[in-house]
Image (cartoon, rainbow, N blue to C red):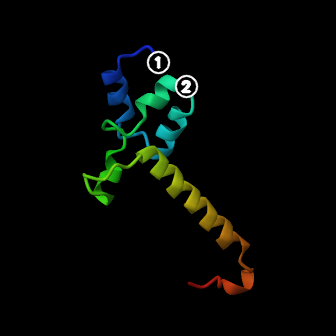
Amino acid sequence: LTDLPGELLELILCCDVLGAADIGRVSCTCRRLREACQPRGKVWPSLLKYYSHSDSVSWLEEYKARHNAGLEAQRIVASFSKRFFSEHV
């Protein structure tokens, strides 16, 4: 994978079957793949709708922050007492 040309690697990383978590995992494997996953190209296009095109945003860092916030929210909800929840919704 690391021997592929950058353009081909970007096409693979833009595949619809790969989610943000997959791209994050790929970026953790080595420097070459981390560089390929950086927010310069088309790898993080699904986040573009939330930001102005003039913003300078690191999509990888933005994903990490959102992912960590989600994990923290799950941890907080899991810590709530069961008496606050009803089986009937």
The residue under label 1 is: 2
Out of 65 and 46, give the one closest to the viewer.
Answer: 65
- The answer to whether 67 appears left or right of 52 in the picture is right
Across and down, in percent, residue 80 comes to 71, 77
- Label 1 CA crowd tier, 10 Å (few <14, some 14–19, many 20+): few
Position of residue 7 relative to residue 73, above or below, is above
- The answer to whether 52 appears left or right of 59 in the picture is left
Q: Are marks 1 and 2 in contact (CB under 8 Å)?
A: yes
Q: How many dots with numbers?
A: 2
Determine the image quadrant of residue 76: bottom right
Position of residue 15 relative to residue 33, above or below, is below
Out of 82 and 6, give the one closest to the viewer.
Answer: 6
Across and down, in percent, residue 25 comes to 54, 37
Q: Which mark is residue 63?
A: none
Across and down, in percent, residue 81 comes to 74, 80
Looking at the image, is mark 1 or mark 2 earlier in the sequence? 1
- The answer to whether 61 appears left or right of 71 in the picture is left
| Amino acid type shown at disc 1 | Thr
- Label 2 CA crowd tier, 10 Å (few <14, some 14–19, many 20+): few
The residue under label 2 is: 30
Residue drawn at (37%, 24%), measured in percent from left and top? Answer: 9
- The answer to whether 33 appears left or right of 89 in the picture is left
Residue drawn at (64%, 82%), measured in percent from left and top? Answer: 87
| Amino acid type shown at disc 2 | Cys
Determine the image quadrant of residue 51: bottom left
Residue drawn at (56%, 33%), measured in percent from left and top? Answer: 28
Across and down, in percent, residue 18 comes to 42, 39
Secondary element at image label 2:
loop
